[in-house]
Amino acid sequence: MSYCNQCPNRCNIDRDLNIGGCGVKNKVKIAKYYLHPYEEPMISGCNGSGCVFFSGCSLKCTFCQNYELSHEARGKEFTVNQLAEIFKQLENDGAHNINLVNPTHYTEQIINALEIYRPNIPIVWNTHGYETLETLKKADPYIDVYLTDLKYFSPNRSFRYAKKANYFEVAEKAVKFMLASKKPVIEDGLMKKGVIVRHLVLPQNVDESVKILHFLKDILGNNYLSIMAQYTPFGFLDDTPELKRKITKREYKTVTDYALSLGFENLFLQDEDSCDTSFIPKWDF
Ligand code: SF4
């Protein structure tokens, strides 16, 4: 992987020497790993999801709640062997799954770590959805569950919030690939295989949410949709003043009522009190 083209940014640079658009070199950087209680119930279960929060990001939304990781690449470096040990430790601690949070820019290293130690619990690929098919196809044999965002529909909105006009064009193919690859298997209330598509409702963006739902209604099948209310103003928002507030009850209700009217059945909804910075983990490294 001397020349990195792992994500749609296709920097084509040597990450042993240079930092790409994701903000990190080849060495795996992690800001925290622990049993996380706040994913969807069929991911967190009663013990928690074994989350590994990777540093750097290939999308970098302006409002990211994990800003220190995604934009500033906060974290500590680990070898691939140490990453495999982290997987083992989380499994021994009782994690229901290994939840790779924002893994794309470390795909090769994660595959290498899983070759060293493959836990006997599901592997969750927790992604922003801005993925190339080449990278997904490489990672797919190691993945049991896709937990993917589908954030923006319109090029002007994805450019405004993440400087990527092609977000939907790319994510549409990625989400279709994920849905074709993993049919849901649920045991004792926990997802063993499958896809959860997450959509975060943003202030003054109900029209985008409606378009996303409309797109998903024909392709989701019996996989799952999670409509998230937890948007919390964070990061540098002076250029996007509409994002300086939480969403209103009315905005969230409009989106969720529309989802129900379209007939989505496997649906996760959130309480309004999920919008709080106390839900953002405290970073360890
Ligand atoms: S993973 Fe990083 S270096 Fe590689 S193509 Fe994407 S942004 Fe560029």
Image (cartoon, helix red, strand yellow):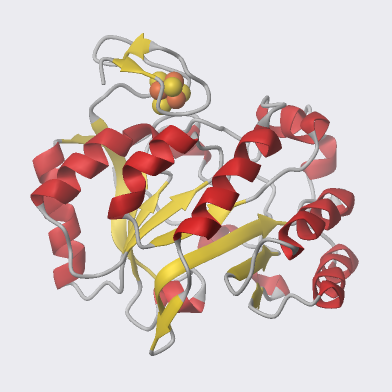
Which residue lies at the image location 15% right of the left edge and 39% below the top edge? 80
Image height check: is 123 above or below 22? below
Which residue lies at the image location 45% right of the left edge and 14% below the top edge? 11
Q: Is residue 271 left or right of residue 95?
A: right
Picture coordinates of residue 189, whole percent (x, y): 44, 86
Q: Extreme bottom residue here?
A: 188
Image height check: is 149 above or below 261? above
Q: Nearer the viewer, residue 159 or 154?
A: 154
Which residue lies at the image location 78% right of the left edge and 44% below the top edge? 244
Q: Is residue 16 left or right of residue 20?
A: left
Picture coordinates of residue 131, whole percent (x, y): 51, 37
Can residue 184 be seen at all in this image of the molecule?
yes
> For the N terminus, which image quadrant?
top left
Res 216 quadrant in image: bottom right
Q: In which of the image's four quarters is ligand 1 placed? A: top left
Q: Nearer the viewer, residue 157 or 65?
A: 157
Q: Nearer the viewer, residue 238 or 92?
A: 92
Q: How many marks?
A: 0
Picture coordinates of residue 126, whole percent (x, y): 45, 53
Can residue 83 be seen at all in this image of the molecule?
no
Which residue lies at the image location 19% right of the left edge and 68% below the top edge? 91
> For the C terminus, which image quadrant?
top left
Res 192 quadrant in image: bottom left
